[in-house]
Image (cartoon, coloured by chain):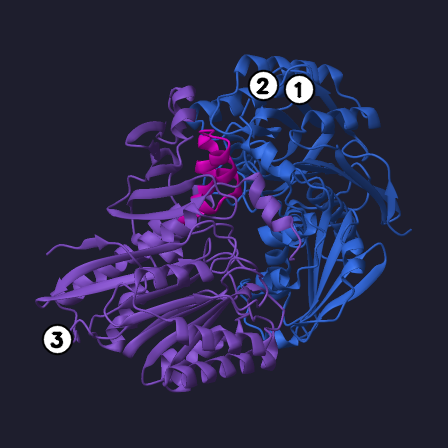
Chain colours: A blue, B purple
Amino acid sequence: MAMKIIEGGVTAAVGFEAAGVEAAIKYQNRKDMALVYSQAPCQAAGVFTGNVVKAAPVLWDKEIVAHSPYAQAVVVNAGIANACTGKQGYECCRQTAQKAGEALGISTDAVLVASTGVIGWQIPVEKIVAGVDRLAQAKAHTPEAGLSAVEAIMTTDTKPKQAAVQIEVGGKTVTVGGMCKGSGMIHPDMSTMLCFITTDIAISRALLQEALSEDVKDTFNMVSVDGDTSTNDTLVVLANGLAGNAEITEKNEDYDKFREALHYIDETLAKKMAGDGEGATALFETKVIHAATKEEARKLCKSVVCSSLTKAMIYGHDANVGRIMCALGYAGVDFDPEQVDLYCEAGGHRMQICKDGMLTDYDEEEATKLLSAPEVSVIVDMHRGDAEAAAWGCDLTHEYVNINADYRS
Amino acid sequence: MAMKIIEGGVTAAVGFEAAGVEAAIKYQNRKDMALVYSQAPCQAAGVFTGNVVKAAPVLWDKEIVAHSPYAQAVVVNAGIANACTGKQGYECCRQTAQKAGEALGISTDAVLVASTGVIGWQIPVEKIVAGVDRLAQAKAHTPEAGLSAVEAIMTTDTKPKQAAVQIEVGGKTVTVGGMCKGSGMIHPDMSTMLCFITTDIAISRALLQEALSEDVKDTFNMVSVDGDTSTNDTLVVLANGLAGNAEITEKNEDYDKFREALHYIDETLAKKMAGDGEGATALFETKVIHAATKEEARKLCKSVVCSSLTKAMIYGHDANVGRIMCALGYAGVDFDPEQVDLYCEAGGHRMQICKDGMLTDYDEEEATKLLSAPEVSVIVDMHRGDAEAAAWGCDLTHEYVNINADYRS
């Protein structure tokens, strides 16, 4: 059986339940707390923000992932990020985990926590604790419960983001599903990225962490909305082993299959975040081909999707070749500009806009039409080797300024 | 005599002439070419874009600064950047310099050239050559001629930017003046930064270059509008020695005086660029104090002024402490967030908004009033040492998006 894309998200895999409830932590009259729970203990792996200023939940989760024997639940709130909150903020995480442990009948150190929202405010502990109780009662192993959870963690997101796939491992059906919120790694304040992936595969913790750490380099770390790395970024995978496959403990064919499934979920969720970037009207992809090394390919395409000027150009539907060349030029890669070819692509149409580092005689009207699509790609051919990479971002719009010039309330 | 701030720009120093004329290279009905000319041969020093994609004039000027015995003129055009233009672009530089040499009676390799505008287009050589003739006729050693030159090099700039000072060196009055255009290092397409500084001081070329290279680290390299490093960035200093001081050939008191004067011109012009950033409504300064090292201080304050989210926050007049802490956190400096204090400052008023990494109980209304000033500073006290640095940027506004989503025409 090849990889099969299915409906659903964090509750797609065997033994995973979820819930979303209203806790009125900051938002009123909307769901703002979510729970992901596994009926069996899980191997947990995580990657977290590289920001020196780490939110309290990030500090808490790093401890759990590194030192707890297993994890079994994640409690998430939207509205307040619990960052720059000192000892009181960390104590709030501990109390949340303790309460969840009691309500779910698991130990405190099996509970991960995550927050997204305004930095600097303290979370009202009594509200989050009350929310945990309701989450524990509401949790269910249904698609509706999964959707309820992903809706509860949205901030400036305009769409809930989830994905799920099935693969076959050692004769057993294995499911990998995930949900995320946010519009970049790469977005503080109201738009941290949080992502939770659940799977029923049996795999060792070391290999689960390795698979995750490797895959984010080509997926979540290649997304940019505004270049701001949040204090709260969190990506956690929980694997409960209920699929019944023989535990994966080495890099064999089964491992490769899981890597492929995980990659699909990571890339799908990463692209959904980029396309739903704050104020975005288009998903903006840059692919670099024929680069000398993978690392070089990543740097080059990320530089293009991060440039304010290429982003504004996508918003204006303007094939401004110079801005793309310029962003490639300051990516930190030494190359000969006169070897570079550029193409635009959308809806299956591709047109060359630059050859040997100079503009082609392309049709401006056609280029404008192409750049008006909701998903636009720029392809950069470096003519230097065999490596390639892709990065995803979005356009820079008036609405982005509206959202971010607005008051915190 | 202490340093004296005077009126004028590139024509303030003895023996320097300038002109601005209409050459219709791209713009119509406005000046678009400028000349700076020295009656005597000059020591020349320059710093140029770090972008791998270098415009043809940058390649030309680097040769002149490195290998010509002296320089005596600069020819500048606005409208087309002459970048990504291959051999034809470089040949255009050569013909421009050759024509200017003939018209001014100096050698071709004493002529620097610079361009700003759309990347990827070829400059119509016949128009630029015709412009050179008119510039040579119009040049004059007057404040009006200096103003005419700075007006001719503007693109999206809303104000001409120039500055001049006088110092006394060995009993002689020495003048340093300059003009620039652009809104960052840090701005391609229609907004390259170009800066030309003239002085009548006598100084060795090695020391002139050293003074310039050192000073840009704390001035022009600390300015950001949008993080995009242009293909054309050029900063040139011409020193013709006509002040009559004994030539400075070592780092003595005279050198220090010149450094101070040069620093004033560099910082003044750099701040003018930041405050006139595309679409900007405010000059946004960040000062880092009590950092462990100078390099660390520079990284931290530059990260804050470069963040899209702090820039949008200034536009919204919103004291969003979390965004500032977040930008400090991903600056690439390892520090303890709980040691950090933050202040806002404008019009002589200062208020603390963060103590020990956590929000103070500041008055929001007062903060909003303070952040509505046309020049706003954020002061970051790291409590780690004695180093400090400042960086300058501007707010991110709807008008920035308008300007950059617009078509190239």
Side of A385 relative to A128 (left or right):
right
Is circle 3 on the same chain as circle 2? Answer: no
Q: Which residue is mark 3?
A: B246
Number of other residues with Cα within 10 Å of mark 1, as a class: few under 14, some 14 to 19, many 20 or more: few
Residue B212, above or below B309? below
The quadrant in which residue A346 appears is bottom right
> Is residue B328 at least partly visible in the picture?
yes
The amino acid sitting under disc 1 is Gly
Select label 1 or label 2 by which is in front. 2
Residue A76 part of the magenta-drawn span: no
Q: Which residue is located at x 70 percent, y 59 percent?
A: A319
Q: Which mark is residue A145?
A: none
Position in image of residue A55 (x %, y %): 50, 33
Side of A119 relative to A284 (left or right):
left
Number of other residues with Cα within 10 Å of mark 2, as a class: few under 14, some 14 to 19, many 20 or more: some
Residue A9, above or below A334? above
The C terminus of chain B: image quadrant: bottom right
Whole-number angstrom distance, CA of label 1 to CA of label 2: 28 Å
Q: What chain does mark 1 sit on? A: A
The amino acid sitting under disc 2 is Lys
Q: Which residue is mark 2?
A: A26
Whole-number angstrom distance, CA of label 3 to CA of label 2: 70 Å
Q: Which residues are magenta?
A: B302-327
Q: What chain does mark 3 sit on? A: B
Q: Are marks 1 and 2 in contact (CB under 8 Å)?
A: no
Position in image of residue A158 (x %, y %): 72, 32
Select label 3 or label 2 by which is in front. 3
